Amino acid sequence: MPSDLSPVIAAAARWLLSAFPPAPGPLNDALAEAQAWQAATIAAALRYPTELDAELLNLLGPGGSDRLDAVTGTDAHPLDSTEHAWRTWVDETVVSWAACLLADADLATLAAACLAATHHGAGSVGDARRLTIPSARDHRAAPLLRHPDLVSPIADLHRETLLGLLEIAPARSSPEPR
């Protein structure tokens, strides 16, 4: 995991899991958390591909969860309380891209392959199999988190930017012929 992005990754994964909770049970919690962390890690590494990007993020901070909360209909949280302070580290674009990756394993595979072009490197998330080759068990553990229709309001916020970064036409799920 890119350690310099860990606050944003942790906040994105936590936000995703709070908005789209896993199926009941500790194993489901663990499997859904692994999927959310893998998606958030890939999304953050693509969003902040250079050391300078990561340093600027740490200096300026991300935007917080306000817009994401509004899109999902979540009540506003007082950010001055320590209970909700983590929400200040939520990056809307990272969460949106992570939602795109969770809803589309082929897109996640392509995104994971693109990590080699970042300073984080291809091995920064391991093999990300729970994200790129999800089993039926992974889907059962996180049915809301992996459901394309349910996550689409969040995924659609920045999907076009992700597809452009990965050089994919919006209506296609594979790279454009060159």
Image (tube, helix red, strand yellow):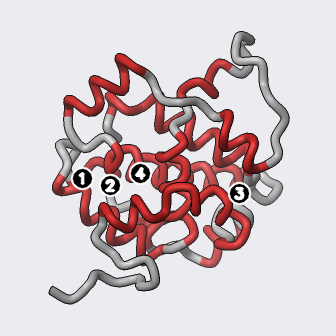
- Give left or right: position of 4 versus 37: left
**Element type at mark 3:** helix
Which numbered disc, 2 or 4, marks the residue that appears first in the sequence?
Answer: 4
For label 2, the SS is loop
Q: Name the residue under label 1.
A: 123
**Mark whose residue sits in front, 4 or 1:** 4
Q: Inspect the image, locate mark 2, and give the three-letter code of the amino acid beneath it.
A: Gly
| Within-10-Å neighbours for mark 1: few <14, some 14–19, many 20+ | some
Q: Which mark is residue 28?
A: 3
How far is mark 4 from mark 1, CA to CA? 14 Å
Foreground: disc 1 or disc 3 = 1
Tell me whether the residue at label 1 lies in contact with that at label 2, contact meaning CB atoms closer than 8 angstroms. Answer: yes
Three-letter amino acid code at the position of disc 4: Ala
**Residue lying at 25% horizontally and 56% vertically, measured from the top left:** 115
User: What is the x, y in percent for residue 20?
Assistant: 73, 54
Helix, strand or loop status at disc 4: helix
Circle 2 sits on which residue?
126
Pick the residue in front: 144 or 138: 144
* Along the line of sight, the residue nearer the viewer: 150 or 36: 150
**Tag 1's secondary structure?**
helix
State the residue position of label 4.
43
Precedes in sequence: disc 4 or disc 1: 4
Q: What residue type is labelled 3?
A: Asn
